[in-house]
Amino acid sequence: MRTTTAHCIVLVSTILAVLSPAVLLSQSAESSPGINRPVTREEIDRLRRTIYDETQSNFEGIFVYHSESGDLNNRLNFYRLGARGNFKLDSGALLYLGGTWTPYSTLNDSFAASGANATFGLKTNLAESVVSQFEAGATRFSTGGSTINALASFDFSFTNASLNFTASRTNVEESLLSAAGIRPVTGPFAGRTVGQVMDNRAVVSGTYQLREKLDVFGNGGTGYRKGVEVDSNPFWLGGGGVGYNVISAPAEESISLLRASYEANYIGYRDNRLGFGGSPASVGGYFSPETFFNHVIRGELRGAAGGSLEYQVSGFVGSQYITGSSRRQAAGFSGMVSVRISDRYSLPVTFARDNFGPFTQESVFARLVVRF
């Protein structure tokens, strides 16, 4: 694979270097006079990097830090260390295998636990317009016991629309109880592991392009959450909105996307399992109101600088309604910067903060990508 990629890079670079502007650009010069110029060295390098990225396997070092507000029962802080290998197969599919270690702690580090996860997956094109992804993994906790995570996803692309079907099973990392589980010393669960809640859901989502810059999007689904000594709790979700791309340009432009959108989202649970209860019917340790509805205005800006830096910032403001809570204002921000150190190395870093739900949460996600 490494030899084939090198040949592709040399071939494309040679073609671009040999062909003069009169040959390479004359076909589009009449309709777009502004691009009647020589091919720059930056464009050749950018194409070379694109070919390299799309054909090379890579290794990722992973670091995550998460903190949130809340009381002793509901607050959860954690960081995550891990690695993942992504292997490009001759068929064009992507095979990946990763492992992470996550220490969890509560307010003032009063209680702590950890989990070790291993996950493998495969992403491939089933057809020209159909992309599938499958993955499975397991987490072993220091509190005893283990959980199984899984995902199956299908993306369909059409001329003016896209459609996605996803079924997933993930850990609920909202409290120490729901994430790693605890062993109470008194009460009806004394001496037994309680928690380790899993979110099981199936969701359909899609977008439709109304006009060149205007689109609508929506999603809907259902699922349930269940854990050790934690009864099943069904939920329903749905949402949608409309977006307008003020600027939409190639990814290498200084501003490749400037987008404004309005969106509304709903999720509702059969039972409220927030906090630690005294009976199997109330224990849970995760956010699960009868009704959670929000609607926000969102802005997004994306672009690149100098061929070695990419950025993306997004922010939203709006209102939310939560059964049993007086909190109404909703706001959040996220920012990503990816620095390309060389053809082989890049460093994407993301920061996010929002107050969706009853708590404010912050997350930092960093990766060191090494291509080989």
Image (cartoon, grey):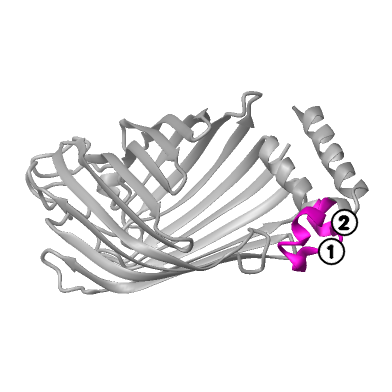
**Which of 70 and 216 lies nearest the eye of the viewer?**
216
- Image coordinates of residue 177 in percent, x first then y, are 25, 47
Reply above or below: 293 against 230.
below
Reply above or below: 340 against 344.
below
**Which of 99 and 308 lies nearest the eye of the viewer?**
308
The answer to whether residue 107 shows anywhere in this view is yes
| Residue that carries the numbered disc 1 in the rendered image | 37
- Image coordinates of residue 256 in percent, x first then y, are 60, 64
Is residue 31 on the magenta stretch?
yes
- Image coordinates of residue 82 in percent, x first then y, are 54, 42
Q: Magenta residues?
A: 24-44
User: Which residue appears at 15% of the width and 42% of the height?
Assistant: 234
Reply above or below: 354 against 347.
below
| Residue that carries the numbered disc 2 in the rendered image | 21
Q: Residues within 10 Å of mark 2 (few under 14, many from 20)?
A: some
Is residue 125 on the magenta stretch?
no
Q: Amino acid at mark 1?
A: Arg
**Which of 270 and 99 lies nearest the eye of the viewer?**
270
User: Image quadrant for the C terminus?
Assistant: top right
